[in-house]
Image (cartoon, rainbow, N blue to C red):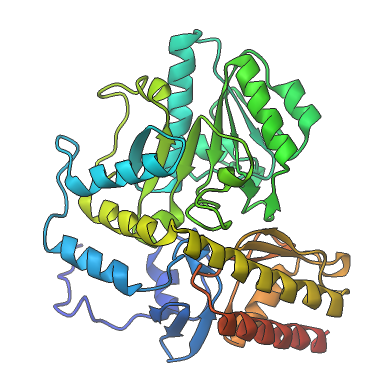
Amino acid sequence: MNAKLDSGVTTRPVTRQTFDEVLVPTYAPAAMVPVRASGLDLWDQEGKHYLDFTAGIAVTSLGHCNPALVEALTRQVNTLWHLGNGYTNEPVLRLALALTEATFAERAFFCNSGAEANEAALKLSRKYAHAKFGAHKSRIVSCLSSFHGRTLFTVSVGGQPKYTEGFEPLPQEINHIPYNDIEAARAAIGDDVCAVIVEPIQGEGGVIPGDHAFLQALRELCDKTGALLIFDEVQSGVGRTGALYAYMSTGVIPDILTSAKALGNGYPIGAMLTTDEIAHHFGVGSHGTTYGGNPLAATVALNVLEIINTPAFLARVREASAKIFANLHQLASDYPQVFGAVRGSGLLIGLPLAEGFKGRAKDITKAAESFGLMLLIAGPDVIRFAPALIVSDAQIAEADRILRAAVDNVLAAE
């Protein structure tokens, strides 16, 4: 039975309970509902203020409602929204030029998410290998505890079985090795491998930096076998580690790089970057997307790049990182029964829990939220910090104060 929409549908009252009533239960969101934000400040339906150290999972790197991005998007909203892939547009051409000039890449493909960017990278790798070597060269090597998206292909390539359970049969010819294990890589990467995909720093898997020697070994093995090396920089890219892309600090250049999240600062966009030689294997009609590279997303991303990709901005990211690391080192020293050794890169930071607190990362982040600090987890044993790259010294100090109060609250309840 069809019910007529309420004439006030855009303003009707909604609450957290509405989520449980009408949305598919793929998430378990917090009890509070954010309604307004600016920079790293956020307010919920009750008017309570929060300091946001999540950046929407490393997305809003220039902060919520960044004025420069609001102005650019508003200008484009009043100019041109959508065309379809029978036409190109000026913003996407400028964005492609900016990305290829700033990276190793010579070609860009735009889509709507990190999962789509990785899907494109994996499909291109197989197409390239089949054309150049034959259909036997189809195997993909990934890492355990990795995360590459939620499509059936990318979730199968990701190294976390909990995300594939119940979705069998899965795509075939995919193998996983331990992260940072060079000997395992040597054993797994043979002449039938078309692609090796790796995060230069694992995000969802626990905020674990890749050893430069491991990444270099992957590069050498791919060169030896003719496989393509894919760097998944969906979370680590666009300034998050203190370089425009994390590969720039490793001495290793991939064949394909994927980017999303911070590239649009919350406006959905993904990008796959690669070389001329590899790109031409994606001919007309071999891959596509309705919305990818639309003028709105491309405009936002171009302005994001213009702001972030400067020496002064990236130097400040590294400076802010050093301050947060120093605070967390001291926190772990002051609460050794709760925390282990801090790790990460730039402003993608993980704080593992000590043995006695394993599995309780959510307890601590919930306590922090109750005190007004939004944090992430990276699995049940790691608290993840991914604040906007514009975080101030005062906000870093405030986060430290709130987190300590939250930890004291958790310990008092023991």
Q: Quadrant of residue 268?
A: bottom left
Residue furthest to the top: 134
Q: Position of residue 66 (x, y in %)?
A: 35, 72
Residue furthest to the left: 79
Q: State whether residue 293 is above or below residue 216.
A: below
Residue plotted at (63% across, 15% down): 225
Q: Quadrant of residue 349?
A: bottom right
Instruction: Give the total of numbered labels.
Output: 0
Q: Is residue 365 left or right of residue 291?
A: right
Q: Quadrant of the C terminus?
A: bottom right
Residue furthest to the front: 311
Judge by depth and name the residue closer to the eye, 158 or 413. Answer: 158
Judge by depth and name the residue closer to the eye, 155 or 61. Answer: 61
Q: Position of residue 388 (x, y in %)?
A: 50, 69
Judge by depth and name the residue closer to the eye, 39 or 11. Answer: 39
Judge by depth and name the residue closer to the eye, 348 or 319. Answer: 319
Residue furthest to the bottom: 47
Q: Is residue 40 visible?
A: yes
Q: Is residue 167 visible?
A: no
Q: State whether residue 308 is above or below residue 369.
A: above
Residue plotted at (22% across, 49% down): 91
Residue plotted at (38% across, 55% down): 305
